[in-house]
Image (cartoon, rainbow, N blue to C red):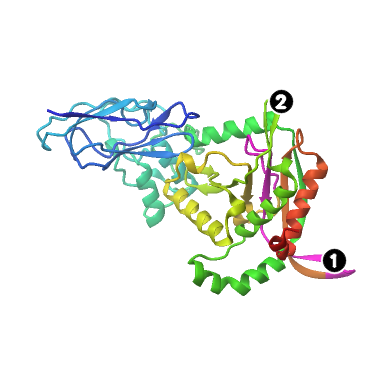
Amino acid sequence: MAIVEVKVPQLSESIAEATMLTWKKKVGEAVAVDEILIEIETDKVVLEVPAPSAGVITEILQGDGATVVAEQLIAKIDSAAVAGAVAPAAAPAASAPATAPVAAPAGADKSGVAMPAAAKILADNNLSAANVAGSGKDGRVTKGDALNAVKTGAAAPAPAAAPVAAAPALLGERPEQRVPMTRLRARIAERLLQSQATNAILTTFNEVNMAPVMDMRKKFQDSFTKEHGVKLGFMSFFVKAAVHALKKFPAVNASVDGNDIIYHGYFDIGIAVSSPRGLVVPILRNADQMSFADIEKKIAEFGQKAKEGKLGIEDMTGGTFSISNGGTFGSMMSTPIINPPQSAILGVHATKDRAVVENGQIVIRPMNYLAMSYDHRIIDGREAVLSLVAMKDALEDPSRLLFDL
């Protein structure tokens, strides 16, 4: 017998613990080297744990839903064994399913019960776990099952008054379901409260005529796509305009550390991206050195990785300024919350035809409302307003970006 240990991957310094999701293999089953055994959820990313060696799983020490730390032993593989030669042993009891208010009897069928990450995905897409075939332990619905159901449309939306799966206790015809926050959602909540509690947040607004950007985009879209293999979107213009303004007003690109102000000599722009697990903010590093094509390609890559749950810790660490585009969901105006330890964030919204006055005449223009929230402790109103005006000017006359005006 040659035992190989399976351990939790190394976590970043800011992450103390993680949650086991669903084992893809059982005791006694054969595995191939680098085959994914389980996914582990942290408050930032979902990590895959591959098999360090081919062989047969002889023991699972931490079950579904267990809380673990870096380098903790979670399973053992016999690299010399043959599948079927190892008698399955009882796996550790998993933590109580998120959707079950009472403990189910040992060995009970748990089909229709969704793991925390899966429950979030199903809820966001108005789907019922009862209509999804679970591949997890005892029939539990895993994250992969939920993503597949959303992709294929196999699960039908749950009727408004239908009983909640695994929650038989109803209040008349008003069903309730208690689901614990995922680690990411809990972390988001913690950081938002931290931001509001520690920053002197103020928001300044302005409007921008997007016609020049739209005309330029229309003029060069075909050749840009042909040359770079990616479409020219609006976000690259917003990123370029933001960097343009940050160079003029360094305090907006700074951060607070105790009683010190750190002025960053680089421009790492966080791009808020919606994912099945919640809001994530991957970072465009050295955005000032990136071309329009570089920015569009990186944003497309982030979007795909977020959708697949493949964003790594390194993708979301750092950042000196953030951009949140609520316009993709139709938002007209909002007051974005600063992403600490950053000191400012730009909120971009939906571009709509609106009546505006130009040279004493009422005309129709495609307008976008910009909102910039900033930490008034280190950014004065003058700097905040002028930096947003600089972004507006750059968007209304993109040629300014060429000459750094």
Labels 1 & 2 near each other (Cβ < 8 A): no
Which image quadrant for residue 69?
top left
Is residue 338 something that shows in the picture?
yes
Which percent across, then down, holds residue 325?
A: 62, 52
Residue 152 placement, left or right of 287: left
- Of the 4 image quadrants, the one containing the C terminus is bottom right
Image height check: is 396 above or below 239? below
Question: Which quarter of the rendered picture does the N terminus lie within?
Answer: top left
Residue type, numbered disc 1: Val
> Could you tell me which residue is drawn at 60 percent across and 72 percent down?
220
Side of 245 where 233 appears, left or right: left
Q: Is residue 219 left or right of residue 399?
A: left
* Residue 404 among those drawn in magenta: no
Vertical placement of residue 395 versus 255, above or below: below
Q: Position of residue 114 (x, y in %)?
A: 38, 39
Residue occupied by mark 1: 357
Which residue shows up at 62% across the image and 49% down it?
A: 324
Magenta span contains residue 347: yes
Neighbourhood count class around disc 2 (C-alpha, 10 Å): few under 14, some 14–19, many 20 upward: few
Query: Could you say whether the residue bearing mark 1 is in a helix, strand or loop?
Result: strand
In the rendered structure, which segment of residues is drawn in magenta? 334-362
The front one of 12 and 196 is 12
Expressed as whole percent of the image width and height from the top left, the position of residue 156 reads: 41, 52
- Whether residue 48 sits left or right of residue 344 in the image: it is left
Mark 2, residue position: 259
